[in-house]
Image (spheres, rainbow, N blue to C red):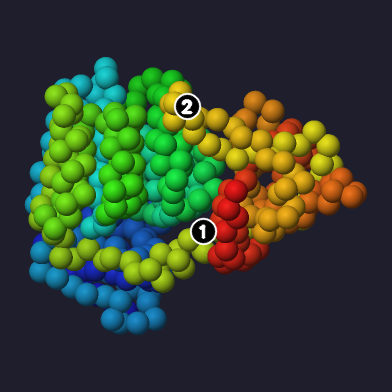
Amino acid sequence: MIKNISKGHTLLVQGPTRVVLVEGKIEVFGKIFVPDKIEENNVLIVPGANVYPLFSVESSKLDVYTNNKDNLIEIEENSIIKEWEDIKDKVLEEIKKKGELNPLKVMVLGISGGKTTLIKYLANNILRAGYKGGYLDSDLGQQMIYLPTTLNIGEIKDYIISSVNIQTEETIFIGSTFPKSNFKFIVAHSCNSLIENYLENHKDTNVILIDSDGWIKTEAGIVYKNYFIETVDPDIIIVLHDDDIEELKEIEKSASKSKKRKIFLIKQENKYFYEKDKEERRFLRQSQFAKILENYRKISMPLKDIKFIKMDFDLENNTLIEQEINVGGLVNLPYHYVIISLMTEDSKLIKIGLLFVINLEKKYILFFSDLNYKEISQVKKIVLGSLRLSTKGNHQGYLYL
């Protein structure tokens, strides 16, 4: 269908929908679309369980392909609120002052309300301003860059609308969609390591954007977020503030103790933000797993010289440790289809997989992955996660070690 949008209006488009810009100019999360022969400049794909705001910079004509006209809602204003624009300008000003010599770390914090959307908006405006940035995704349950249960960092090389626009440069496997127990310490140290490695390889970086999860509303959530902030030490924290959440106020108070750190509170609610429900989040996780798993196959490997590892944290020494798991005890647990990380002797991640069978009698293991022959020969450690999946990406339960 053809849809005409007046200048200054926004078309909220729910997926699955395909939009082609025929005339005019629109802005989506800070990226400008214009009529062009190159599809990435004038075609927008909105995935299912997502809503993208198409702001009409000029009066525009769109050719829209959707299975439900209710997927399109036009509003007579920009859905990007004034506070977001102000924060964006402040971040750009801080980068201009410091980021060319001293890369800034900018963290977005909150329970919901659009943390990842705000990160995309900031990333695209940083790119438009000519700065170089990295994107750290620390949300185990709703990964933008790669798979749930992992942490990832990637360079902002192009405008980011969806996950296809950014690729991971380094992945750290956690194996859970939730930073439970000692994972809350492991996540913080792992994220700090990702940032340090990234800056070592990208000397011209001006800013690192840090996306976070929404685990806040418990005492453990306060401990987790405070420890994360203390360990990663962001220069700027942007908080999607909520006066009704006391835990969030405690985290803000603790984060403000650093005199060098700037805290920006966004108190204005974005009434047009689309909040995914529990089922949509589950669907997105399953889709991400299914996309990777469809290319996997069964692989067998000799059990000899393979160590099974559980990542843990030494509180006394404030360091990560690899705890070896006895195979004899492991086979008595519901380990089948647990997500695993296949690693080298020096703990470098090779690939993610699913563990099928440990055959002690014939001394081999069977797992599901897409390793080539050379990679198989490099596997010396298998890090066990806790999430168990089907080969279609469906949740099957947990492995508790």
Check disc 1 and give the amino acid type: Gln
Locate residue 72: give its quadrant.
Answer: bottom left
Most foreground residue, 128 or 281: 281
Where does the image place residue 296, in percent across and percent down from the top left?
69, 55
Q: Earlier in the sequence, mark 1 or mark 2?
A: 1
Can residue 118 be spotted in the picture? Answer: no
Residue 366 as seen in the image, left or right of residue 203: right
Q: CA distance from mark 1 to mark 2?
A: 31 Å
Where does the image place residue 400, in percent across and percent down from the top left?
58, 53
Most foreground residue, 233 or 180: 180
Crowding at mark 2 (Cα within 10 Å: few <14, some 14-19, many 20+): few
Residue at point 70%, 53% (across, down): 355
* Total numbered labels placed on residues in the image: 2
Residue 362 as seen in the image, left or right of residue 131: right
Most foreground residue, 103 or 342: 342
Where does the image place residue 388, in percent across and percent down from the top left?
60, 59
Residue at point 65%, 50% (across, down): 353
Nearer the camera: disc 1 or disc 2: 2
Q: Quadrant of the N terminus?
A: bottom left
Residue denoted by label 2: 319
The vertical placement of 401 against 304, above or below, is: below
Locate residue 317: give its quadrant.
Answer: top left
Residue at point 60%, 61% (across, down): 389
Residue at point 18%, 66% (across, down): 272
Check disc 2 and give the amino acid type: Thr
- Circle 1/circle 2 CB separation < 8 Å: no
Can residue 170 be spotted in the picture? Answer: yes
Residue denoted by label 1: 288
SS under mark 1: helix
